[in-house]
Image (cartoon, rainbow, N blue to C red):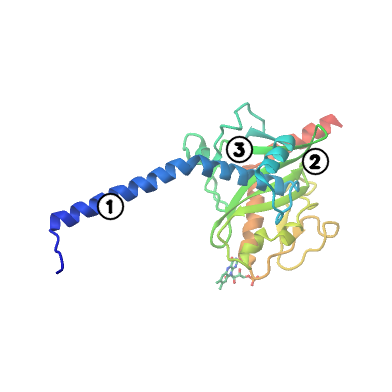
């Protein structure tokens, strides 16, 4: 014989199931949060090291290995984007995402083809040292591709003019087309390209088709085939972040301090 349940019983039972499940999910989310944050930090460190050419993409590295290379070679600093000056804000507690979203610490960006919406007052940059001297800086970048906002890092030589590496760690472009922005073979085309022309204008761009090696095409990188819109998005992203509203002032300071030191 089939047992029948009253409506209040069914509602009560469903509520108990919902409460128990939500408690389980929320306690799992809370208990895993520190782990997720650690993994996010590790992922950021790997990508900074990859842009700087200190680890290879595709290779597997242990957590301790990454942390050790990062601690030995990388010096994170928070800079004032408008002046390009380093600040004494603690890079370990600085949260770039929170700053970007905070209307009191960021401003609407002027209309730009990279579709960057807000410009934060400060940015977290990573100085890469070699034998005690500044060797390169790794800068965070973001800009619109075809389908998505692409997030990455670009490493610039201590000369403030030459690309040392590029990596995109988060995007929603189509695998095999725009998604090739994270193909190691394409990323290998970047080191040695020049960012600015002698007059100081941003010249670097992704072209349609082949560009050739840096000696022949100092300002150009091969386009991604079948992905002209994503390629253009990369050019726009670099144009924005190397310009006056992005890291332009910081790189000017870098070039000046190099000239003063030599
Ligand atoms: C399913 C699908 C996915 C696509 N994904 C991308 C993409 O991620 N990036 C991109 O630039 N173009 C993508 N395209 C192609 C664009 O629509 C456009 O045709 C292309 O950017 C033109 O590039 P081409 O001049 O190199 O052919 C996609 C097209 C289709 C049908």
**Secondary structure of the residue carrying numbered label 3:** strand
State the residue at coordinates (64%, 61%). Answer: 232
Residue reaching furthest front? 1
CB contact under 8 Å: marks 1 and 2: no
Question: Residue 110, percent across and down?
Answer: 55, 46
Q: Quadrant of residue 256?
A: top right
Residue under label 2, please give it.
159
Question: Residue 249, percent across and down?
Answer: 68, 37
Q: Between disc 3 and disc 1, whose residue precedes?
A: 1
Q: Residues within 10 Å of mark 1 (few under 14, many from 20)?
A: few
Query: Residues under labels 3 and 2: Cα distance?
Result: 20 Å
Q: Between disc 1 and disc 2, whose residue precedes?
A: 1
Please count the marks in the image: 3
Quadrant of the image containing the N terminus = bottom left
State the residue at coordinates (47%, 34%). Answer: 104
Compared to residue 177, the image places residue 196 above or below, namely above
Residue reaching furthest top? 88
Residue mark closest to the camera, 3 vs 1? 1
Residue under label 3, please give it.
123
Residue mark closest to the camera, 1 vs 2? 1
Quadrant of the image containing the C terminus = top right
Q: Quadrant of residue 220?
A: bottom right
Residue under label 1, please give it.
17
Which residue is at the front of the view, 13 or 164?
A: 13
Task: Determine if residue 166 is in view.
Answer: yes
**Secondary structure of the residue carrying numbered label 1:** helix
Which residue is at the front of the view, 10 or 4?
A: 4
């Amino acid at each position: 014989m089939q047992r029948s349940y009253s409506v209040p019983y069914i509602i009560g039972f469903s509520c108990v199931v919902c409460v128990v499940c939500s408690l389980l999910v929320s306690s799992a989310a809370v208990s895993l949060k520190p782990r997720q944050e650690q993994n996010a930090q590790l992922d950021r460190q790997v990508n900074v090291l990859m842009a700087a050419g200190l680890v290879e993409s595709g290779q597997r590295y242990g957590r301790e290995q990454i942390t050790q290379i990062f601690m030995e070679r990388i010096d994170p600093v928070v800079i004032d984007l408008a002046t390009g000056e380093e600040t004494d804000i603690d890079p370990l507690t600085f949260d770039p995402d929170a700053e970007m979203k905070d209307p009191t610490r960021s401003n609407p960006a002027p209309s730009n083809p990279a579709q960057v919406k807000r410009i934060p007052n400060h940015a977290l940059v990573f100085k890469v040292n070699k034998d005690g001297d500044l060797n390169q800086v790794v800068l965070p970048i973001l800009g619109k591709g075809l389908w998505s906002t692409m997030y990455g890092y670009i490493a610039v030589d201590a000369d403030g003019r030459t690309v040392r590496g590029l990596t995109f760690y988060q995007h929603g472009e189509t695998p095999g087309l725009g998604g090739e922005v994270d193909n190691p073979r394409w990323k290998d085309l970047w080191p040695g390209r020049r960012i600015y022309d002698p007059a100081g204008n941003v010249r670097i761009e992704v072209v349609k088709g082949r560009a050739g090696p840096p000696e022949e095409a100092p300002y150009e990188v091969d386009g991604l085939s079948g992905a002209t819109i994503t390629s253009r998005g990369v050019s726009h992203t670099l144009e924005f972040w190397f310009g006056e509203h992005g890291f332009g002032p910081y790189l000017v300071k870098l070039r000046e301090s190099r000239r003063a030191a030599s």
